[in-house]
Image (spheres, grey):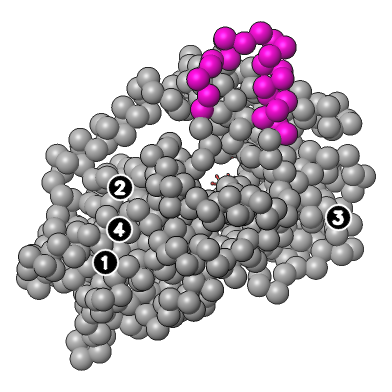
Amino acid sequence: MSSTNVETVDVVIIGAGFSGMYAIHRLRNYKVVCLEAGDGVGGTWYWNRYPGARVDIQSVEYSYGFDEDLQQEWSWPEYFSAQPDLERYANHVADRFNLREHIRFSNPVTRMKFNEAENLWHVYTATGGHFACRHVIAATGSLTAPNLPPWPGREQFKGEIYHTARWPAEGVDFSGKRVGFIGTGSTGIQAMPIIAEQADELYVFQRTPAYCMPSGNRPLDEAHERDWKDNYPQRREHILQTYGASMVEYPEFSAHDCSPEQREEILEKAWNSKSAFQLIVAFSDVMTDTAANEIVCEFARGKIRSIVKDPEVAELLCPTTYPIGGKRLCVGNGYFEMYNRDNVTLVDVKTAPIVEFTESGLRTAAAQYDLDVIITATGFDAVTGAMDRIDIEGCNNRKLKDKWADGPTTYLGAMVSGFPNMFMIHGPSTPAAQAQMITTGEWQVNWTADIIDAMEREGLNRIDVTEEAEQEWAQEVDMGVLGTSPPNVTLIATAHAS
Ligand code: NAP
């Protein structure tokens, strides 16, 4: 594209998800353009329209705190809002704060190059857009790029194929259909019970079973809403001081301080707490002590055995190869109960993996399954996936992909040495999906915007970080994982493996 078509702005924001939207608002006194791949706002909550999609953190928490009027006037219908309500909220915020005037929809960024002589980033989009700017904020999300199934023969299959993260806005009619579903993570667990009610037959292809507890979702009661609205500023302040930026906190006592009866009582209460995280914070050491963790695992397995009537199916659904909390604990609405339906079949693809798509369905190492619809809830190329899909070139013609070939290195998860004036929100080595991402996103945007403000105020053209600073941050993150302070998932996983 010729330089006459370059649009010069101060800041380019990539992505109009929750962090990108707040970044527009926070930086609107600059010339700001936000480039968004989709044709609407909301990011994760725009793309993941699969049936049953729902947040697992209370909506009164999982919402913006930057504007007191906004949090006072908005009402969530349920404790854990469904995707349509989150998308409605994102649209409300976009309208209320006039964000759309800054957003170029259907404009995925394909390439970015830093011009060292100009101290400018040049940002290119798939639709031919070319922007020159001093600062780039990559609010690209950590769960953006879907993992597509690796099996050959996809083009042979005569039926419909969907990925849950690219769900059609008009929905899918499953009536009278044989559906194959791959993926038993948070997404699959939410979607399948609803699909099972509509489909003729549902085949669940399970590789690794999940720990899952009931969501306890319910209409939001007025007293609870009032209590939050009366205390928002203090609560927002408080949650930023907690691990995970949420109101969920560890108790003082260890599992080893309790008798078996006390443990059972505490775990039963946690199971019925209507908060997904209570099970992994039932004792102070669930995430740091292998034996304490195993107590909770066994409780969760006991629940599966008591809900699922067929003992063989129940055993196959019991996770045994990793600690509870080692992967995000899933929340369900009738997930295990679904396996008591006559039209649901659990297929173990750990022992007999899926081999290929065929004309009429899927073939595993053990059998052929004839299907009308195949749904993959196979997760994401997480954390780096969205950045990897953009061809990013920094100083000395170095590509980010090459720099990250052996794994991502960052300073504070926000900046990368050799890629000046480029800031990431929820980047690699931030808590990302381990935390309540709207609040931590706001915090990171504020940090970034403060830097941009300071640079503009002081007439500085370029900010970069050193490789030493990246190494120090990597060491600090490693210490967080391997150290003694809870929670420490890797330590447990290592102990299990040894
Ligand atoms: P995920 O947790 O990565 O789960 C992907 C599933 O697909 C796993 O069961 C995985 O099995 C399976 N899979 C992948 N490749 C496969 C293959 N080749 N053959 C058979 N099975 C295969 O993805 P997700 O469920 O979409 O969740 C991703 C993240 O999104 C979650 O951790 C959570 O942070 C977020 N999320 C949150 C909510 C919520 O807040 N309620 C809802 C949905 C998602 P293996 O385990 O064996 O790899």
Please tell me whether mark 3 sits on a helix, a strand or a loop.
helix
**Does residue 188 appear left or right of residue 129 in this picture?**
right
Against 276, residue 416 (above or below) is below
| Residue at image mark 3 | 197
Three-letter amino acid code at the position of disc 3:
Glu
Q: Which mark is residue 461?
A: none
What residue sits 64% from the left and 57% below the top?
81
Say which residue appears at 27% left-offset and 32% top-offset.
476
Please identify, in this view, whether the residue under mark 4 or under mark 1 is nearer the observer.
Answer: 4
Magenta extent: 250-272
According to the image, label 2 marks what residue? Answer: 413
Assess disc 2: are there few (<14), some (14-19) or many (≥20) residues with their C-alpha within 10 Å of its C-alpha.
many
Spatial distance from mark 1 to mark 3, Cα to Cα?
46 Å
Mark 4 highlights which residue? 446
**Mark 1 falls on what kind of element?**
strand
Using a 10 Å C-alpha cutoff, classify the residue at mark 3 as few (fewer than 14 neighbours), some (14 to 19) or many (20 or more).
some
